[in-house]
Amino acid sequence: MLRAAEGWPVLQHDETWLYHISQDGKACPTCTPFDSNSYRGDYLLYEFPFLEVLSPFKALVHNETSFHAALRCQCSVEWVNPSEVLVQRLMAEFEAVL
């Protein structure tokens, strides 16, 4: 996968994202078991359809449960291996040019 001039797209399979429950102590019983689960970047949109990307490294999942509506959920996911992924992508791009 070669990048365009503006960079690579976010939420690709080589990214590892870590789930964090809301830090206000009000996580619902449905969200609590997800705490510290890891997800591949391209699976996030299927697992959490209300995902709201805040930055290239963090997103709110807005998990809709029987305890609350999607927009009330403050759980998040964080990209935990950006340096590793970027080095691998650059090496693959470099090798493709050679």
Image (cartoon, rainbow, N blue to C red):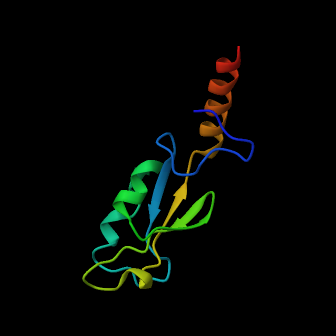
Q: Looking at the image, is 42 positioned above or below residue 54?
A: above
Q: Residue 25 or 58: which is nearer the viewer?
A: 58
Q: Quadrant of the C terminus?
A: top right
Residue 54 is left or right of residue 61, and the answer is right
Q: Looking at the image, is 50 positioned above or below residue 58?
A: below
Residue located at (49% from left, 83% from top): 24
Does any portion of residue 40 appear in the rendered image? no
Q: Residue 39 or 89: which is nearer the viewer?
A: 89
**Quadrant of the rendered structure where residue 91 is?**
top right
What x and y, as percent, mark residue 5? 75, 42
Q: Name the residue at the right extreme.
A: 5
What x and y, as percent, mark residue 61? 45, 69
Residue located at (34% from left, 64% from top): 34
Q: Quadrant of the N terminus?
A: top right
Residue 68 is left or right of residue 60, and the answer is left
Does any portion of residue 88 appear in the rendered image? yes
**Quadrant of the rendered structure where residue 67 is?**
bottom left
Q: Name the residue at the top extreme.
A: 98
Residue located at (68% from left, 31% from top): 90
Residue 34 is left or right of residue 80, and the answer is left
Q: Looking at the image, is 73 positioned above or below residue 17?
A: below
Q: Name the residue at the front extreme.
A: 4
